[in-house]
Amino acid sequence: MTQDERVTEQQPDDEMPWAEVTPDAARRLLVAAVEAFAARGYHATTTRDIASRAGMSPAALYIHYKTKEELLLRISRIGHEKALRILRRAADAEGTATERLAEAVRSFVRWHAGHHTTARVVQYELDSLGDEHRPEIVALRRESDAAVREIIEDGVATGEFQVPDVPGTTVAILSLCIDVARWFNTQGRRTPDEVGVFYADLVLRMVGAAPRA
Amino acid sequence: MTQDERVTEQQPDDEMPWAEVTPDAARRLLVAAVEAFAARGYHATTTRDIASRAGMSPAALYIHYKTKEELLLRISRIGHEKALRILRRAADAEGTATERLAEAVRSFVRWHAGHHTTARVVQYELDSLGDEHRPEIVALRRESDAAVREIIEDGVATGEFQVPDVPGTTVAILSLCIDVARWFNTQGRRTPDEVGVFYADLVLRMVGAAPRA
């Protein structure tokens, strides 16, 4: 893959984050909430902190979000929907299971590295959601899991992959990719794209894919 | 491996947690701090919360720990020293690189699954340590990294492993094992031991180890 192809391919995941959130004030508050939750954790953050980071008054925040949890739910939902879209697109694409699994890992890792602050909040604050809202997010996670499992099952069926435990391997692959958000550092030696390419290779080894020519 | 062997093998990692912390009051406070940090995050926890969880007064806490950060540092140091001991023991053991890497992963994963609450605090609250204390912990992490890298380098040298990028693969293997602390659930279908055995197999695939007879 040339540098140019990689840049082009990166676009769909790197659209302006939270572009779907309108009006502008609601989006600014969401960005401020992600930063505050990532810096100090959900429970240590107040709606006053978030409003202040966004350069707004607490009263202005309440126009858009009734509670702090509503902000977390919105962030978590958008993040999980994005993850699912990435994995679903790869699962539904043309190509062999090997190609589709590699693309799923490349794009999922690229997102977790490129948006590591958001990804940390999305992945680590799940327990902070109340019982009322957690099931919705857990359902999205199950769908993400199913998209990856589907590709692996296809690869086993065609003989491309050798996988003794498909559900366990699915969990491990997603886990490996998600943890990129914890250690990825913009000062590190690899770009998000490069980590994605490297990880696709590791994951193909995990599923016992035949080495490519 | 029989059930009995597994139980026996598990002992060294499953000694009473924090046994090295004395007197008893200091240990109880440390256990309470781990629970509080895991439940609400470091920044949202007060020393009063910790004392109260331990059934003690804030004044009694200050006899043992001057600050909340001192508690986190103590937890983080013990956790990282434990991780290093596990990995170092595997790296220095007799046996082929394949056997030593499998044992490193089995015991490291078993610890992260079996002590997932502690492991989450140890792994996720690193940024909450002040600049004064973080370098000590970062140095322990580098040593853990070196222990795994050493085994992989040995395996590449003997021809047991096929690894194009040893440092990158080392990071990925540790990352895969650490993230077990995030998703492991005592109600899940696998015990900490079983996850360890399964992961050792996945990691041997990641390093391109020759399939065992």
Image: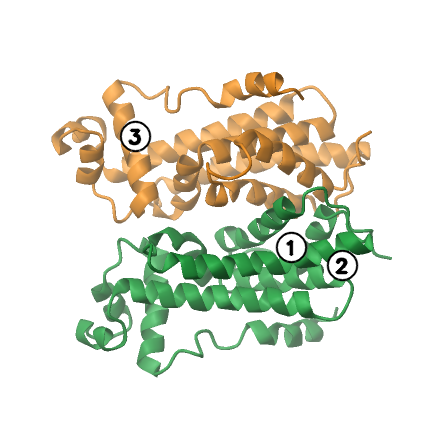
Chain colours: A orange, B green
Q: Are marks 2 and 1 on the same chain?
A: yes
* Quadrant hosting residue B177: bottom right
Disc 2 secondary structure class: helix
Answer above or below: position of B16 versus B37: below
Seen at 62% across and 61% down, the residue is: B147
Seen at 56% across and 55% down, the residue is: B188
What percent of the width, then of the height, locates residue B134? 38, 57
Answer above or below: position of B86 versus A179: below
- The label on residue B149 is 1
* Quadrant hosting residue A89: top right
Answer above or below: position of B179 versus B6: above
- Please identify the quadrant where the N terminus of chain B is shown: bottom right
What percent of the width, then of the height, locates residue A124? 42, 46
Q: Are marks 3 and 2 in contact (CB under 8 Å)?
A: no
Instruction: Say which amino acid is labelled 1.
Output: Arg
What percent of the width, then of the height, locates residue A8? 56, 16
Protein chain holding label 2: B
- The label on residue B98 is 2
Q: Which residue is mark 3?
A: A30
Seen at 40% across and 37% down, the residue is: A117
In front here: A136 or B196?
Answer: B196
What percent of the width, then of the height, locates residue B101? 70, 59
Query: Earlier along the polypeptide chain: callout 2 or callout 1?
Result: 2
